Image (cartoon, rainbow, N blue to C red):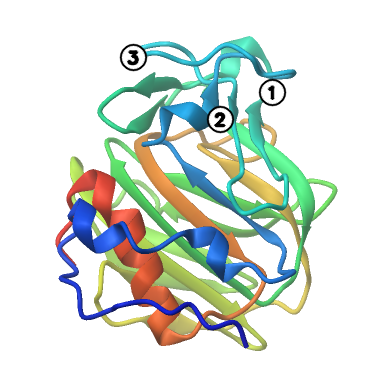
Amino acid sequence: MLSLGLDLSLSGNGGAGSAAAFDPAMLFDGDTGFVFDFSDGSTIFQETSSPSTASGNGDPIGTVLDLSGNGNHISAATDANRPTYSSDGYGSFDGSDDYLTAAFTLNQTLTLVFSARAVGSIFFDILIAGGATSASISQDSGANVLTLFCGGVVGAIPFSNGEDFVITARASGATSRIAKNSGSYTTGNAGATNFGGITLGARNDGVNPCEARFYRAIGIGRDLNDDEITAARIWCAAPAGIAL
């Protein structure tokens, strides 16, 4: 088991000091997955392939580099599908045609931690190779609740439009769980299939686009322990100033 050596006695208020000691790449010891940090402009480029031009404030996002060491960089399908970068530390998705995606194999045992603001809706997909939706975080039928779909339906987690939050989703064996910030999990059944890739902002075919901000995201092909999840949540919360 990889020892993170984290000082979790630090305040979990999302401040820079609480996140500074944690590098999410430390979670990965041969594990599949990804780390995206929209608050780090050095990882964000305008091109959808062969990224070279850094995105400045208000510029389109064509590619976001994966910081996990797995090389699972996400990119827009076309120039028209690019969200925009804010120097305030987030990617802005317009709810019309913006989405970023990458295809790779991700084991069924999964932990996903991400921070976002739901402006109108939110959609974070984890997909079976070939394009069928295997797991997703989405807004439920226009109501202000987030629902985890993972072989069954798990939810609902209430939210308010304009609210910044951290979502933790876990799928392991026959159980899946979802929680907002540091609240309690809701639970349900999960499928037993592996996942294929990640799509942020819509489905991998661009359907169900969301209007949202995304700050940071960690996805890993194993069930993180409680200390690891706490550290991941604090790291994700920091650029949004979310109190956990």
Whole-percent x, y for residue 186 in the image:
37, 81
Position of 128 with respect to 203 (left or right) is right
- The front one of 51 and 20 is 20
In this view of the protein, can residue 47 be seen by the observer? yes
> For the point 67% across and 52% down, which residue is it?
69
- The front one of 79 and 97 is 79
Identify the secondary structure beneath mark 1. loop
Position of 149 with respect to 244 (left or right) is right
Amino acid under label 1?
A: Ala
**Quadrant of the image occupied by residue 231:** bottom left
Q: In the image, is residue 195 above or below residue 10?
A: above
**Separation of marks 2 and 3 at Cα, in angstroms:** 18 Å
> For the point 46% across and 73% down, which residue is it?
154
The image's mark for residue 175 is: none
Graded by Cα atoms within 10 Å as few (under 14), some (14 to 19) or many (20 or more), the crowding at tag 1 reads many
Q: Which residue is mark 1?
A: 77
Q: Which residue is mark 2?
A: 99
Identify the secondary structure beneath mark 3. loop
Asked whether the beta carbons under mark 1 and mark 2 sit within 8 Å of each other, the answer is yes
Q: In the image, is residue 227 above or below residue 80?
A: below
**Separation of marks 1 and 2 at Cα, in angstroms:** 8 Å
Q: In the image, is residue 174 above or below residue 143?
A: below
